[in-house]
Image (tube, helix red, strand yellow):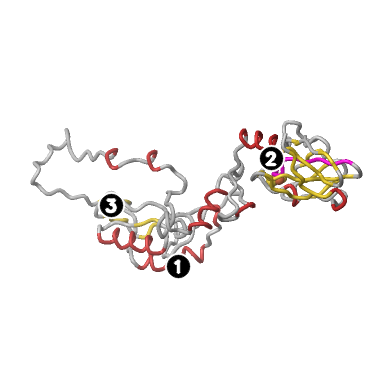
Amino acid sequence: MKPLKIALWSELSDRKPIPVLVEGIDLVIIRWDEQVSVLYGRCKHRGALMADGVVEGDNIICGVHGWDYRLASGVSAYNNSEALDKFQSWVEADGLYVDVDEILAWKHQHPQPYDRTAYQGAYADLHGTIEEPSTQYIHQLAREGLSKVGHHGPVAAMGVPAPTLPQWDDLQFVTAQLARLPQLDDVSVGTELVIGPRAKQPLKLDIPLFVSDMSFGALSEEAKVALAKGAELAGTGICSGEGGMLPEEQAANGRYFYELASALGQTHTFLNTLGVTQSIPTQR
Ligand code: FES
Protein backbone atom coordinates (compact mmCIF):
# COMPACT_ATOMS: atom_id res chain seq x y z
CA MET A 1 0.00 0.00 0.00
CA LYS A 2 1.15 3.49 -0.83
CA PRO A 3 -0.94 6.17 0.94
CA LEU A 4 -1.40 9.52 -0.77
CA LYS A 5 -3.04 12.55 0.82
CA ILE A 6 -5.51 13.99 -1.69
CA ALA A 7 -7.37 16.57 0.41
CA LEU A 8 -7.70 18.14 3.82
CA TRP A 9 -10.78 16.82 5.54
CA SER A 10 -11.46 20.16 7.21
CA GLU A 11 -11.53 21.89 3.83
CA LEU A 12 -13.96 19.53 2.12
CA SER A 13 -17.30 21.22 1.66
CA ASP A 14 -20.35 19.18 2.45
CA ARG A 15 -22.04 17.61 -0.62
CA LYS A 16 -19.79 19.38 -3.08
CA PRO A 17 -18.03 17.13 -5.61
CA ILE A 18 -14.29 17.83 -5.71
CA PRO A 19 -12.04 16.73 -8.59
CA VAL A 20 -8.63 15.19 -8.04
CA LEU A 21 -6.20 13.63 -10.49
CA VAL A 22 -4.12 10.71 -9.23
CA GLU A 23 -1.69 8.98 -11.59
CA GLY A 24 -3.65 10.37 -14.54
CA ILE A 25 -6.95 9.01 -13.24
CA ASP A 26 -9.81 11.43 -12.68
CA LEU A 27 -11.39 10.91 -9.30
CA VAL A 28 -14.19 12.70 -7.54
CA ILE A 29 -14.34 13.21 -3.80
CA ILE A 30 -17.75 13.62 -2.20
CA ARG A 31 -18.15 14.33 1.44
CA TRP A 32 -21.58 14.18 3.00
CA ASP A 33 -21.92 14.73 6.72
CA GLU A 34 -19.13 12.63 8.23
CA GLN A 35 -18.89 10.20 5.35
CA VAL A 36 -16.79 10.35 2.24
CA SER A 37 -16.47 8.51 -1.08
CA VAL A 38 -13.72 8.61 -3.65
CA LEU A 39 -15.16 7.44 -6.95
CA TYR A 40 -13.89 7.19 -10.48
CA GLY A 41 -14.43 10.72 -11.69
CA ARG A 42 -15.89 10.25 -15.16
CA CYS A 43 -19.48 9.55 -16.04
CA LYS A 44 -20.14 6.13 -17.57
CA HIS A 45 -22.34 7.74 -20.20
CA ARG A 46 -19.97 9.94 -22.16
CA GLY A 47 -17.11 10.60 -19.84
CA ALA A 48 -18.06 13.98 -18.40
CA LEU A 49 -16.23 14.95 -15.23
CA MET A 50 -18.41 14.02 -12.28
CA ALA A 51 -16.87 16.84 -10.27
CA ASP A 52 -18.90 19.14 -12.55
CA GLY A 53 -22.07 17.45 -11.34
CA VAL A 54 -24.17 18.02 -8.24
CA VAL A 55 -25.26 16.04 -5.22
CA GLU A 56 -28.97 15.41 -4.90
CA GLY A 57 -30.15 13.31 -1.99
CA ASP A 58 -28.12 10.11 -1.92
CA ASN A 59 -26.79 10.56 -5.46
CA ILE A 60 -24.20 12.42 -7.41
CA ILE A 61 -25.75 13.56 -10.68
CA CYS A 62 -23.76 14.08 -13.84
CA GLY A 63 -24.04 17.68 -14.94
CA VAL A 64 -24.35 16.86 -18.62
CA HIS A 65 -27.28 14.47 -19.07
CA GLY A 66 -28.24 13.64 -15.53
CA TRP A 67 -26.98 10.11 -15.00
CA ASP A 68 -27.06 9.26 -11.30
CA TYR A 69 -24.74 7.34 -9.03
CA ARG A 70 -25.12 6.56 -5.34
CA LEU A 71 -22.70 8.51 -3.17
CA ALA A 72 -21.95 5.55 -0.96
CA SER A 73 -21.39 2.89 -3.63
CA GLY A 74 -21.04 4.60 -7.01
CA VAL A 75 -23.80 2.32 -8.36
CA SER A 76 -26.66 3.89 -10.28
CA ALA A 77 -30.03 3.37 -8.67
CA TYR A 78 -31.63 3.85 -12.07
CA ASN A 79 -29.55 1.12 -13.70
CA ASN A 80 -27.39 -1.00 -11.42
CA SER A 81 -25.11 -2.00 -14.28
CA GLU A 82 -23.90 1.58 -14.47
CA ALA A 83 -21.42 2.20 -11.70
CA LEU A 84 -18.46 4.39 -10.90
CA ASP A 85 -15.75 2.31 -9.30
CA LYS A 86 -15.11 3.22 -5.69
CA PHE A 87 -11.63 3.49 -4.24
CA GLN A 88 -10.50 2.99 -0.68
CA SER A 89 -10.14 6.22 1.25
CA TRP A 90 -9.60 7.10 4.88
CA VAL A 91 -9.10 10.14 7.10
CA GLU A 92 -5.99 10.50 9.18
CA ALA A 93 -4.93 13.64 11.06
CA ASP A 94 -7.14 15.88 8.89
CA GLY A 95 -5.86 14.29 5.71
CA LEU A 96 -8.00 12.31 3.27
CA TYR A 97 -5.93 9.47 1.81
CA VAL A 98 -6.17 6.98 -1.02
CA ASP A 99 -3.95 4.03 -1.90
CA VAL A 100 -1.87 4.83 -5.00
CA ASP A 101 -1.15 1.13 -5.58
CA GLU A 102 -4.88 0.41 -5.85
CA ILE A 103 -5.32 3.27 -8.30
CA LEU A 104 -2.35 2.14 -10.39
CA ALA A 105 -3.75 -1.38 -10.54
CA TRP A 106 -7.11 0.02 -11.64
CA LYS A 107 -5.38 2.17 -14.24
CA HIS A 108 -3.65 -0.90 -15.62
CA GLN A 109 -7.07 -2.47 -16.16
CA HIS A 110 -8.63 0.75 -17.45
CA PRO A 111 -6.18 2.73 -19.59
CA GLN A 112 -7.43 6.29 -19.90
CA PRO A 113 -7.68 7.92 -23.34
CA TYR A 114 -7.89 11.52 -22.16
CA ASP A 115 -5.12 13.87 -23.25
CA ARG A 116 -5.32 17.15 -21.39
CA THR A 117 -3.01 18.84 -23.87
CA ALA A 118 -5.12 17.92 -26.91
CA TYR A 119 -8.20 19.58 -28.38
CA GLN A 120 -10.97 19.69 -25.73
CA GLY A 121 -8.51 18.14 -23.26
CA ALA A 122 -10.21 16.82 -20.14
CA TYR A 123 -13.63 17.54 -21.65
CA ALA A 124 -13.33 15.43 -24.77
CA ASP A 125 -16.23 13.11 -25.55
CA LEU A 126 -14.20 10.24 -26.87
CA HIS A 127 -16.76 7.60 -27.58
CA GLY A 128 -20.12 9.28 -28.28
CA THR A 129 -23.20 7.08 -28.38
CA ILE A 130 -25.10 4.97 -30.88
CA GLU A 131 -27.80 7.66 -30.96
CA GLU A 132 -25.31 10.32 -32.00
CA PRO A 133 -22.97 8.58 -34.42
CA SER A 134 -21.77 11.84 -35.96
CA THR A 135 -20.27 13.30 -32.81
CA GLN A 136 -16.80 12.02 -33.54
CA TYR A 137 -16.97 13.38 -37.07
CA ILE A 138 -18.07 16.81 -35.82
CA HIS A 139 -15.16 16.82 -33.41
CA GLN A 140 -12.80 15.87 -36.20
CA LEU A 141 -14.04 18.78 -38.32
CA ALA A 142 -13.71 21.17 -35.39
CA ARG A 143 -10.20 19.90 -34.76
CA GLU A 144 -8.86 19.59 -38.29
CA GLY A 145 -11.24 21.60 -40.44
CA LEU A 146 -11.50 20.26 -43.97
CA SER A 147 -7.78 19.61 -44.26
CA LYS A 148 -8.26 15.85 -44.44
CA VAL A 149 -11.45 15.62 -46.46
CA GLY A 150 -11.09 18.22 -49.20
CA HIS A 151 -12.87 21.49 -49.76
CA HIS A 152 -16.37 20.02 -49.99
CA GLY A 153 -15.93 17.43 -47.28
CA PRO A 154 -16.88 13.79 -47.78
CA VAL A 155 -19.33 13.36 -50.63
CA ALA A 156 -22.21 10.90 -50.55
CA ALA A 157 -25.22 10.66 -52.82
CA MET A 158 -28.21 11.26 -50.55
CA GLY A 159 -26.95 8.62 -48.16
CA VAL A 160 -27.11 5.86 -50.77
CA PRO A 161 -23.94 3.78 -50.71
CA ALA A 162 -22.33 4.12 -54.14
CA PRO A 163 -21.72 0.38 -54.63
CA THR A 164 -25.48 -0.28 -54.46
CA LEU A 165 -26.29 2.18 -57.25
CA PRO A 166 -26.51 0.98 -60.85
CA GLN A 167 -23.16 1.04 -62.56
CA TRP A 168 -22.41 1.96 -66.15
CA ASP A 169 -21.66 -1.69 -66.83
CA ASP A 170 -25.25 -2.52 -65.86
CA LEU A 171 -26.59 -0.60 -68.85
CA GLN A 172 -27.28 -2.55 -71.97
CA PHE A 173 -28.43 -0.86 -75.16
CA VAL A 174 -30.26 -3.24 -77.43
CA THR A 175 -30.20 -1.30 -80.64
CA ALA A 176 -31.34 -3.97 -83.03
CA GLN A 177 -31.39 -7.72 -83.19
CA LEU A 178 -34.30 -9.52 -84.86
CA ALA A 179 -36.74 -7.05 -86.35
CA ARG A 180 -33.87 -5.07 -87.79
CA LEU A 181 -30.46 -6.26 -88.65
CA PRO A 182 -27.65 -4.83 -86.51
CA GLN A 183 -25.44 -2.33 -88.23
CA LEU A 184 -21.75 -2.77 -88.71
CA ASP A 185 -19.39 -1.05 -86.34
CA ASP A 186 -18.55 1.88 -88.57
CA VAL A 187 -22.16 2.82 -89.37
CA SER A 188 -23.29 5.81 -87.38
CA VAL A 189 -26.58 5.37 -85.58
CA GLY A 190 -28.87 7.90 -83.98
CA THR A 191 -29.16 8.03 -80.21
CA GLU A 192 -31.85 10.67 -80.06
CA LEU A 193 -34.95 10.05 -78.04
CA VAL A 194 -38.32 11.78 -78.19
CA ILE A 195 -40.61 11.51 -75.21
CA GLY A 196 -44.22 12.37 -75.99
CA PRO A 197 -43.86 12.60 -79.77
CA ARG A 198 -47.50 13.67 -80.11
CA ALA A 199 -47.36 16.10 -77.21
CA LYS A 200 -47.63 19.84 -77.83
CA GLN A 201 -44.05 20.14 -76.68
CA PRO A 202 -42.24 16.79 -77.00
CA LEU A 203 -39.11 16.28 -75.01
CA LYS A 204 -36.21 15.70 -77.36
CA LEU A 205 -32.95 14.32 -76.10
CA ASP A 206 -29.85 13.57 -78.13
CA ILE A 207 -29.02 10.61 -75.91
CA PRO A 208 -31.28 8.39 -73.81
CA LEU A 209 -29.68 9.60 -70.60
CA PHE A 210 -30.09 12.62 -68.38
CA VAL A 211 -28.45 13.94 -65.23
CA SER A 212 -30.49 12.62 -62.38
CA ASP A 213 -32.07 14.38 -59.44
CA MET A 214 -29.70 15.90 -56.94
CA SER A 215 -30.90 19.25 -55.70
CA PHE A 216 -28.90 22.38 -55.03
CA GLY A 217 -27.85 21.95 -51.44
CA ALA A 218 -27.17 18.26 -51.85
CA LEU A 219 -24.74 19.45 -54.52
CA SER A 220 -22.93 22.77 -54.58
CA GLU A 221 -23.76 25.59 -56.98
CA GLU A 222 -20.57 24.90 -58.93
CA ALA A 223 -21.42 21.23 -59.32
CA LYS A 224 -25.03 21.87 -60.34
CA VAL A 225 -24.10 24.48 -62.94
CA ALA A 226 -21.26 22.34 -64.29
CA LEU A 227 -23.56 19.33 -64.65
CA ALA A 228 -26.22 21.46 -66.31
CA LYS A 229 -23.69 22.78 -68.83
CA GLY A 230 -22.29 19.32 -69.47
CA ALA A 231 -25.77 17.91 -70.02
CA GLU A 232 -26.56 20.76 -72.41
CA LEU A 233 -23.42 20.02 -74.41
CA ALA A 234 -24.38 16.34 -74.51
CA GLY A 235 -27.84 17.28 -75.78
CA THR A 236 -29.70 16.14 -72.72
CA GLY A 237 -31.25 17.56 -69.60
CA ILE A 238 -30.79 17.78 -65.87
CA CYS A 239 -33.26 17.23 -63.08
CA SER A 240 -33.84 19.73 -60.29
CA GLY A 241 -33.98 17.26 -57.44
CA GLU A 242 -36.55 17.89 -54.75
CA GLY A 243 -34.78 20.61 -52.83
CA GLY A 244 -33.27 23.94 -53.69
CA MET A 245 -33.07 25.03 -57.32
CA LEU A 246 -30.74 27.45 -58.98
CA PRO A 247 -31.69 29.97 -61.67
CA GLU A 248 -28.11 29.63 -62.94
CA GLU A 249 -28.61 25.93 -63.42
CA GLN A 250 -31.89 26.44 -65.28
CA ALA A 251 -30.23 29.05 -67.47
CA ALA A 252 -27.45 26.64 -68.36
CA ASN A 253 -29.69 23.90 -69.72
CA GLY A 254 -32.62 24.02 -72.08
CA ARG A 255 -34.12 20.76 -70.84
CA TYR A 256 -34.56 21.35 -67.18
CA PHE A 257 -36.54 18.55 -65.53
CA TYR A 258 -38.48 19.67 -62.53
CA GLU A 259 -39.00 17.07 -59.82
CA LEU A 260 -42.45 17.64 -58.42
CA ALA A 261 -41.93 16.75 -54.78
CA SER A 262 -45.27 16.66 -53.01
CA ALA A 263 -43.74 17.29 -49.61
CA LEU A 264 -42.16 20.57 -50.60
CA GLY A 265 -45.29 22.57 -51.22
CA GLN A 266 -44.51 23.87 -54.70
CA THR A 267 -47.07 26.21 -56.16
CA HIS A 268 -48.68 26.97 -59.49
CA THR A 269 -46.87 30.29 -59.44
CA PHE A 270 -43.55 28.55 -59.20
CA LEU A 271 -44.39 26.08 -61.95
CA ASN A 272 -45.42 28.95 -64.19
CA THR A 273 -41.93 30.41 -63.83
CA LEU A 274 -40.66 27.19 -65.38
CA GLY A 275 -43.13 27.35 -68.23
CA VAL A 276 -45.00 24.37 -66.87
CA THR A 277 -48.75 24.56 -67.32
CA GLN A 278 -50.11 21.36 -65.90
CA SER A 279 -52.00 21.44 -62.64
CA ILE A 280 -50.66 20.05 -59.42
CA PRO A 281 -52.50 16.98 -58.15
CA THR A 282 -53.55 17.40 -54.56
CA GLN A 283 -54.08 14.78 -51.91
CA ARG A 284 -56.84 15.00 -49.33
S1 FES B 1 -22.00 12.37 -19.83
FE1 FES B 1 -22.87 12.04 -17.94
S2 FES B 1 -24.92 11.82 -18.29
FE2 FES B 1 -24.07 12.09 -20.25
For this orientation, the residue located farthest to the top is 81
Q: Earlier in the sequence, mark 2 or mark 3?
A: 2
Which residue position is annotated with label 2?
A: 44
Secondary structure of the residue carrying tag 2 is loop
Q: Position of residue 139 (x, y in %)?
A: 55, 53
Give SS at disc 1.
helix
Q: Is mark 3 within 8 Å of ligand 1?
A: no
Pointer 2 local density, CA inside 10 Å: few below 14, some 14–19, many at least 20: some
Q: Which region shows up in magenta?
A: 35-43
Residue at 81% over, 40% down: 37
In the rendered structure, which disc, 2 or 1, sits on the residue that comes first in sequence? 2
The three-letter code of the residue at mark 1 reads Thr
Q: Which residue is mark 1?
A: 273
**Amino acid type, residue under disc 3 in the picture:** Val
Q: Position of residue 279 (x, y in %)?
A: 49, 57
What's the amino acid at mark 2? Answer: Lys
- Badge 2 residue CB within 8 Å of ligand 1: yes
Res. 194 mark: 3
Q: Are marks 3 and 1 in contact (CB under 8 Å)?
A: no
Q: How far across and how far down the image is residue 221, in percent?
A: 41, 64
| Image quadrant where residue 111 sits | top right
Q: Residue at x 56, y 54 (%)?
A: 118
